[in-house]
């Protein structure tokens, strides 16, 4: 039995009730439905706002991050007043302000192989708004194992993708992307940037697909992938087929339970500044500030030229990571060298490249020029 | 000649070009022409053995070449080819 709508709810949803495809019964269906939104960032912001406004009865939010000033260029569910607060708390308050008639359940924890099935099992659909490959593969596999639709969207710079991966009726994410790209090949938004309005465009399409699936109306993007490019203002559609060799949804699937997704993708399951322990190839910003006083050090900055306008180190040589392999002859392997980038991950890949090319005296500036700006030169901006 | 759409992450290797006109009567020839025009894109599409990397998805019109004849899929003049990137931002 579907729940009844109160007098207040009938007024609130009157524009929905007027559409024959939704109507009173559709609105009651939404009230009875639940959606889990993985990630409360760029995509999670418009997605959760519109699903809440539409009257989806129960919304789950998974995120373990806190609101940072650099989020607000696109994560419009949060605000200057919630900087430093938990994202799930910040989002919940905004959603309940928009619609106090719904229930918002928050999970202030990373979405992992240990908790994902438990969290997702009580929801009708799952929306993938995560920011990294490991969590995307995890979100897919959870949806396949639980037999639920995975409403997928993904963004990078000016590009967006939307699909509904529903293994019962069509392909899953792994059918299209059996393997992740090698670590470092595709930059994350924290490294490569993203147009702030892009998750708005793509997230509202994702929310549209979720509502269609919950209502059982229209033609959802099952077996289809939407590709959007904001610069060219193009929308392209391609057909997706179930992959007979898919390792989770194919007839000979060999992955029957959740795996170690960080190991599978070779990257951490977050899009943060590197917070790992200092390794033997690292030099911290403070150590570097001491070393430059006494030693001659060659500083190699592997960021893109447009980033140097934001912040730079005096006397650093700039070779963008993408050009490094072709420009090794410009460097002397006899030099003591420190490689740096924005936050330490591109420089780590540069270090690996240099090491495999025979450079032995190379260190990685831990945390990048942002760490230098935090710990040494506090006049320098952080980005 | 067929036109190949390049996704943003790979445009760094095509001088920023979003669409590259390639010659060839099948995918293999078209990609060979692409990598002749823009050699630095090659390692992003092919592994050391010269095979298309598994995460590379190439579509002819609306169909994945994996659902057609792979790199032997024939292509017609003016056909639209699309490289679909694996992106993860959210
Ligand atoms: Zn599959």
Image (cartoon, coloured by chain):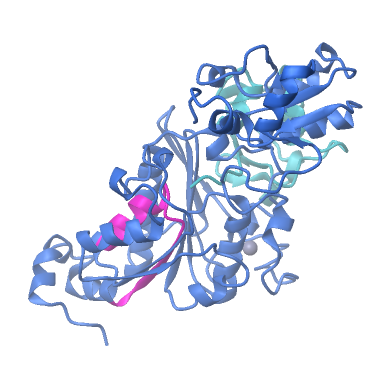
Splitting the image into four quadrants, where does ligand 1 fall?
bottom right
Q: Position of residue A263 (x, y in %)?
A: 74, 57
Q: Nearer the viewer, residue B76 or A186?
A: A186
- Residue A153: % across, % down: 47, 51
Frontmost residue, A274 versus A264: A274
Q: Does the magenta run of residues contain A75?
A: no
Q: On screen, A345 above or below A249?
A: above
Q: How many marks?
A: 0
Residue A273 sits above or below residue A250 on the image: above
Residue A51 inside the magenta-drawn segment? yes
Which residue sits at x=71%, y=25%? A290
Q: Which residue is at a point 82% across and 28% down the rendered structure image?
A: A362
Quadrant in the picture for the N terminus of chain A: bottom left
Residue A21 placement, left or right of A122: left
Residue B35 visible within the image: no
User: Where does the image place residue A351, in percent across and percent down from the top left?
Assistant: 78, 31
Q: Which hue belongs to chain B? A: cyan
Q: Position of residue B23 (x, y in %)?
A: 69, 22
Say if residue A341 shows up in the picture. yes
Quarter-of-image position of residue B80: top right
Q: Which residues are magenta?
A: A32-52
Most extreme residue toward the bottom is: A1
Q: Colour of chain A?
A: blue
Q: Is residue A33 above or below residue A130?
A: below
- Foreground of the two, A310 or A155: A310
Which residue corresponds to the image point at 70% horizontal and 52% vertical from the top-left? A265
The quarter holding residue A339 reads top right
Taking the image as shown, residue A90 lies to the left or right of residue A327, namely left
Q: Is residue A38 left or right of residue A89?
A: right
């Amino acid at each position: 039995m579907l729940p009844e709508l109160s007098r207040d709810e009938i007024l609130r949803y009157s524009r929905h009730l007027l559409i024959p495809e939704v109507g009173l019964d559709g609105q009651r269906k939404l009230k009875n439905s639940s959606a889990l939104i993985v990630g409360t960032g760029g995509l999670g912001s418009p997605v959760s706002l519109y699903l809440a406004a539409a009257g989806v009865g129960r919304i789950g939010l998974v995120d373990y991050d806190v609101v940072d000033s650099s989020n607000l260029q696109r994560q419009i569910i949060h605000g200057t007043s919630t900087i430093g607060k938990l994202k799930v708390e910040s989002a919940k308050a905004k959603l309940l302000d928009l619609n106090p008639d719904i229930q918002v359940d928050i999970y202030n924890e990373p979405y992992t192989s240990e908790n994902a099935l438990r969290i997702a099992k009580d929801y009708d659909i799952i929306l993938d708004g995560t920011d990294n490959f490991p969590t995307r593969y995890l979100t897919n596999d959870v949806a396949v194992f639980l037999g639920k639709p995975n409403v997928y969207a993904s963004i990078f710079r000016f590009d967006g993708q939307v699909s509904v991966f529903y293994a019962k009726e069509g392909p899953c994410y792994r059918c299209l992307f059996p393997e992740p790209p090698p670590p470092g090949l595709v930059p994350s938004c924290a490294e490569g940037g993203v147009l702030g309005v892009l998750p708005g465009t793509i997230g509202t399409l994702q929310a549209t697909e979720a509502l269609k699936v919950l209502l059982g109306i229209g033609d959802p993007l099952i077996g289809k992938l939407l590709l959007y490019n904001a610069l060219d203002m193009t929308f392209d559609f391609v057909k997706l087929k179930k992959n007979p060799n898919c390792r989770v949804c194919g007839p000979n699937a060999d992955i029957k339970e959740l795996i170690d997704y960080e190991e599978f993708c070779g990257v951490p399951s977050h899009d943060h500044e590197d917070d790992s322990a200092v390794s033997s190839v690292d030099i911290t910003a403070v150590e570097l500030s001491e070393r430059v006083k006494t030693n001659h050090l060659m500083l190699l900055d592997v960021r893109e030229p447009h980033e140097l306008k934001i912040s730079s180190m005096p006397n650093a040589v700039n070779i963008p990571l993408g050009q490094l392999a072709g420009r090794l002859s410009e460097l002397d392997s006899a030099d003591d060298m420190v490689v740096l980038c924005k936050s330490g991950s591109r420089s780590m890949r540069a270090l690996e490249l240099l090491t495999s090319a025979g450079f032995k005296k190379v260190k990685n500036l831990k945390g990048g020029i942002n760490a230098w700006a935090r710990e040494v030169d506090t006049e320098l901006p952080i980005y | 000649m067929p036109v190949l759409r390049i996704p943003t992450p790979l445009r760094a290797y095509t001088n920023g070009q979003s669409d590259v006109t390639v010659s060839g009567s099948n995918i293999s020839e078209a990609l060979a022409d692409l990598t002749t025009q823009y050699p630095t894109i090659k390692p992003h599409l092919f592994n050391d053995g010269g095979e298309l990397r598994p995460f590379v998805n190439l579509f002819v019109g609306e169909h994945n070449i994996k659902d057609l004849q792979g790199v032997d899929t024939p292509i017609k003049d003016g056909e639209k080819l699309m490289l679909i990137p694996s992106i993860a931002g959210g």
